[in-house]
Image: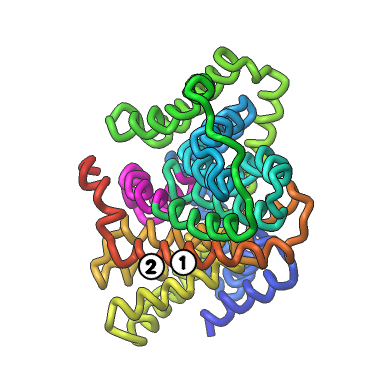
């Protein structure tokens, strides 16, 4: 009964069109009152959910990504890789994925990367004959790489909830992120070849060198951010601050495309994005606390174990559950709602929490593309001026190939665990 109320009321309110954060908060407060769990505990629990040092990295990584995009790093990366890839079929589509991988190493936010890529590439792809629905779907899929490739905001949330090392999660996401990017190239190339979409020409050595010099500061940004963490120079939160100051230096001193007026706009956008995330974090944490206090989370874990003692079967069921949840909710809410129920299973089957974090995050990256709640699709639809229905059809090949990547990552755990072991994280 308690579980039905906890999940049923939430889904009922969610399907009524209420924002996720409001739905989580409404259900939590109602059940705290109904079961007399102690209304005085609401404020302390809400505060405890957001008052974590590791979460400070989120606004700084968001700001760093916005700064890097505003100072022109994205367009320089696109120009460089276009000259290298040349006139092969789907050249600009492949450029989009490669730039998505590189830019993912700066911002950590799927919607932010989707917006950065879409602003530059939607018009460019249209000019070369690419269909708008395909371009929008590809950009949304490339943007989803941001929550797999470090520094990922999703990994920060997962690490805070589970107590898993965030640097280890960051290292674990590198190879799966690259694998996901590579498999996204398969439908991109096939569709482009079928429809006759080609790049323009190879760049000359001089053109490539000049483009490399222009993009150099963007190319080394991920190495500075991640290298500092793995070298023990700074923590993930400190790395986010370093990324901001590095972006300011590049934007104001090197490229000189950033001024104080635009900096104010970037700070305003960062505050808005961070506030949305933290409100969700606070209410999702309160929702998880309510469910745990009512005993729902423990009962759910027991029910899952009663379905099968085979870890492979349960892993398939968990991934199906997460894929469905990704269609309905944002990644942060899913972490807070489902992890309290899944942590006991992780311990029972002795699954590596770092590997499981990567598996869960790749799942939620797919969720950013699956309607009706597909945040990346909404972002790119707004930029491309295209309907969600149109882009939903075009994104299907990318969703299917990302599920293939997910299966590879599940079946070969060493792909996620090799780098954390190498760096002894």
Question: Is residue 96 or residue 417 the one in the foreground?
Answer: 96
Residue 176 among those drawn in magenta: yes
Q: Residue at x 43, y 66 (%)?
A: 404
Relative to 293, residue 95 above or below: above
Q: Nearer the viewer, residue 174 or 320?
A: 174
Q: CA distance from mark 2 to mark 1?
A: 6 Å
Residue 338, horizontal then vertical, whole percent: 46, 67
248 or 144: which is nearer to us? Answer: 144
x, y (%) of residue 295?
Answer: 43, 75
Q: Secondary structure at mark 2?
A: helix
Marks 1 and 2: in contact by CB < 8 Å?
yes
> Image height check: is 313 above or below 243?
below
Q: Which mark is residue 403?
A: 1
Q: Which mark is residue 99?
A: none
Q: Residue at x 61, y 38 (%)?
A: 200
Question: Could you classify mark 2 by the number of other residues whose Cα lies within 10 Å: few (under 14), some (14-19), or many (20 or more)?
Answer: some
Residue found 46% across the figure and 32% down from its top: 240
In which quadrant of the rendered view does residue 26 lie? bottom right
Residue 244 higher or lower than 397, as above or below: above
Figure colour scheme: rainbow
Q: Residues within 10 Å of mark 1 (few under 14, many from 20)?
A: some
Q: Which secondary structure, mark 1?
A: helix
Q: Is residue 97 magenta?
A: no
- In the rendered view, does 146 fall on the left or right side of 385? left
Magenta residues (range): 152-178
- What kind of secondary structure does the magenta stretch mostly adopt? helix
| Residue drawn at point x = 64 percent, y = 48 percent | 276
Look at the picture and state if 159 lies above or below 321. Answer: above
Question: Could you say where residue 173 lies in the image, as x and y percent from the top left?
Answer: 37, 49
| Residue matched to label 2 | 407
């Amino acid at each position: 009964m308690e579980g039905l109320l906890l999940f049923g009321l939430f889904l009922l309110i969610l399907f009524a069109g209420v924002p996720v954060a409001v739905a989580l908060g409404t259900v939590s407060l109602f059940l705290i009152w109904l079961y007399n769990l102690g209304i005085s505990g609401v404020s302390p629990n809400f505060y405890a959910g957001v008052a974590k040092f590791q979460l400070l990295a989120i606004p700084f990584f968001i700001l760093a990504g916005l700064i890097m995009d505003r100072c022109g790093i994205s367009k320089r990366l696109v120009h460089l890789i276009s000259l290298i890839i040349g006139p092969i079929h789907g050249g600009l589509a492949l450029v989009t994925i490669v730039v998505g991988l590189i830019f993912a190493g700066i911002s950590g936010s799927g919607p932010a990367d989707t917006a950065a890529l879409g602003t530059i590439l939607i018009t460019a792809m249209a000019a070369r004959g690419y269909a708008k629905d395909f371009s929008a779907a590809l950009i949304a899929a490339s943007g989803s790489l941001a929550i797999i490739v470090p520094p990922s905001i999703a990994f920060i949330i997962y690490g805070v909830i589970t107590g898993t090392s965030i640097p280890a999660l960051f290292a674990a996401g590198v190879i799966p992120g690259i694998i996901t990017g590579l498999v996204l190239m398969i439908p991109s190339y096939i569709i482009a070849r079928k429809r006759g979409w080609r790049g323009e020409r190879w760049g000359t050595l001089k053109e490539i060198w000049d483009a490399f010099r222009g993009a150099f500061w963007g190319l080394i940004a991920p190495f500075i951010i991640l290298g500092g963490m793995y070298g023990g120079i700074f923590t993930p939160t400190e790395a986010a601050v370093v990324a901001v100051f590095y972006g300011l230096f590049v934007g104001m001193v090197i490229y000189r495309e950033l001024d104080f007026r635009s900096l104010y706009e970037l700070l305003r956008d960062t505050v808005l994005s961070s506030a949305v995330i933290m409100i969700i974090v606070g209410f999702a944490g309160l929702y998880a606390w309510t469910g745990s206090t009512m005993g729902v989370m423990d009962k759910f874990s027991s029910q899952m174990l009663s379905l099968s003692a085979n870890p492979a079967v349960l892993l398939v069921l968990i991934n199906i559950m997460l894929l469905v949840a990704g269609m309905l909710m944002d990644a942060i809410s899913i972490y807070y709602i489902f992890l309290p129920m899944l942590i006991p299973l992780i311990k029972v089957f002795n699954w590596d929490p770092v590997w499981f974090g990567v598996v869960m995050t790749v799942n939620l990256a797919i969720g950013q593309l699956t309607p009706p709640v597909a945040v990346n699709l909404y972002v790119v639809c707004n930029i491309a001026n295209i309907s969600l229905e149109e882009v939903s059809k075009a994104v299907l090949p990318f969703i299917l190939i990302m599920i293939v990547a997910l299966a590879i990552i599940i079946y070969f755990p060493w792909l996620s665990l090799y780098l954390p072991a190498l760096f002894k994280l």
